[in-house]
Amino acid sequence: MTGPAPECVALAEGLREVRARTGLSLAALAERTAYSKSSWERYLNGKKPAPRQAVEALCAMAGEPAGRLLALWELADAEWSGRARHTRPAVPPRPPRPPQIPGAPWAPPGGRGVGCSPSVRGWSRWPPSRR
């Protein structure tokens, strides 16, 4: 099993640092925001994704610009939501195969693509050359 994504860890660490600078306990933080003490515990430990508004509220209480933490929030949110996996494919996509129409005069027997096919007298070129 893998651990949390580095983006999520970085956001949780950033939130903990800002909270430490405020000097507020989790209970005091809950009293001053719309989020409960248990919610803050989950956000600060990276157990749950922090809402953007919670990040903004914490930065406002600390008197700090929210830009850095909001940038981390964007990256972490992409990981939590799965958008990051859709923007970075793990395996490069395979090139599309050319369409093969069964029975078309240019399709070799068996629809295996252009090339050579076995014949009664050995391998021969498909389609047969006109000499």
Image: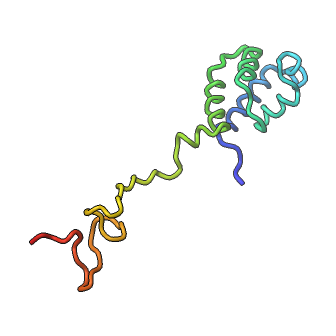
Q: Nearer the viewer, residue 20 or 92?
A: 92
Q: Residue 68, percent across and down?
A: 63, 24
Farthest bottom residue? 121
Q: Please give left or right for residue 86 compared with residue 35 in the image.
A: left
Q: How is the image coloured?
A: rainbow
Q: Quadrant of residue 81?
A: top right
User: Relative to 123, is 32 above or below?
Assistant: above
Q: How many marks?
A: 0
Q: Please give left or right for residue 106 compared with residue 65 in the image.
A: left
Q: Nearer the viewer, residue 10 or 89?
A: 89
Q: Quadrant of residue 52?
A: top right
Q: Residue 55, percent across and down?
A: 72, 23
Residue shown at 50% from the left, 52% from the top: 91
User: Relative to 51, is 4 above or below?
Assistant: below
Residue shown at 22% from the left, 68% from the top: 127
Residue shown at 85% from the left, 21% from the top: 29
Quarter the C terminus occupies: bottom left
Q: Nearer the viewer, residue 122 or 5?
A: 122
Quarter the N terminus occupies: bottom right
Q: Please give left or right for residue 129 compared with residue 105 in the image.
A: left
Q: Residue 105, percent across and down?
A: 26, 63
Q: Quadrant of residue 60?
A: top right
Residue shown at 84% from the left, 29% from the top: 39
Farthest front residue? 103
